[in-house]
Amino acid sequence: DTAVSQTPKYLVTQMGNDKSIKCEQNLGHDTMYWYKQDSKKFLKIMFSYNNKELIINETVPNRFSPKSPDKAHLNLHINSLELGDSAVYFCASSPSRVGAPNTEAFFGQGTRLTVV
Amino acid sequence: GENVEQHPSTLSVQEGDSAVIKCTYSDSASNYFPWYKQELGKRPQLIIDIRSNVGEKKDQRIAVTLNKTAKHFSLHITETQPEDSAVYFCAASQYSTLTFGKGTMLLVSP
């Protein structure tokens, strides 16, 4: 009965590789997000999708590309990985709709990405 | 965009003491202020939230206060227990994505 699940939980890869992280929510939520948590624990928004449409695209390198095949999925693809990409990436979802008051975000368990 | 400042970055208390974490926000249009708790190696989870039409909200040992005029809100934990040890994040938003503060590591010593 996992609400927001992301895979893999751990990802170790070499510099220059391309990798993807998958996220799925079974809560029927309209909005999904990707957050990056660095070594100092700071949670920073990367992307926000509402009903498969990109709503927010914060200042992240264009090596990061989100893809939402449907409302329940938001995947994150990263090209040409760099050492500085090492972090924990959290997917989240919320029932928020564009123009409606915001509500609680539910987080996935996180993906710890280590670039070596 | 919204900017959220959170203090202190680390807070150490003795079991049974109270803990207070404070946040300020910049966008006066923000109207939703949640607090998340993140235990080591776990995901952030909502513990309490407040909307701008309310000044205070309480849930057992946890309370949140909001001062819209001053644009600051606070988390109060009474009778702290070792299991309260975690990183706590405040956040603010209006219609768009939550903007988080940088977190407070709370350490409760037995």
Image: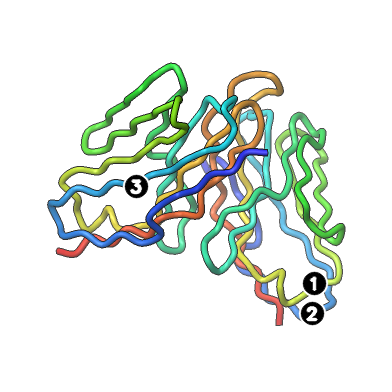
Q: Amino acid under label 1?
A: Leu
Identify the residue under disc 2.
A15
Report the residue at 66% width, 31% height from top: B96
Q: Amino acid under label 3?
A: Ile
Identify the residue under disc 3.
B21
Residue A112: x and y, percent?
60, 66
Q: Amino acid under label 2?
A: Met
Taking depth in this image into account, of B105 and A109 the one nearest to the observer is B105
Task: Give the distance between the C-alpha atoms of the residues marked 2 and 1, in whole angstroms.
Answer: 5 Å
Residue B50: x and y, percent?
42, 27
At mark 2, the secondary structure is loop
Chain of the residue on which disc 3 is drawn: B
Task: Give the distance between the C-alpha atoms of the residues marked 1 and 3, in whole angstroms.
Answer: 36 Å
Q: Are marks 3 and 2 on the same chain?
A: no
Report the residue at 44% width, 44% height from top: B36
Report the mark closest to the observer, 1 or 3: 3
Query: What sort of colour scheme is used for the picture?
Result: rainbow
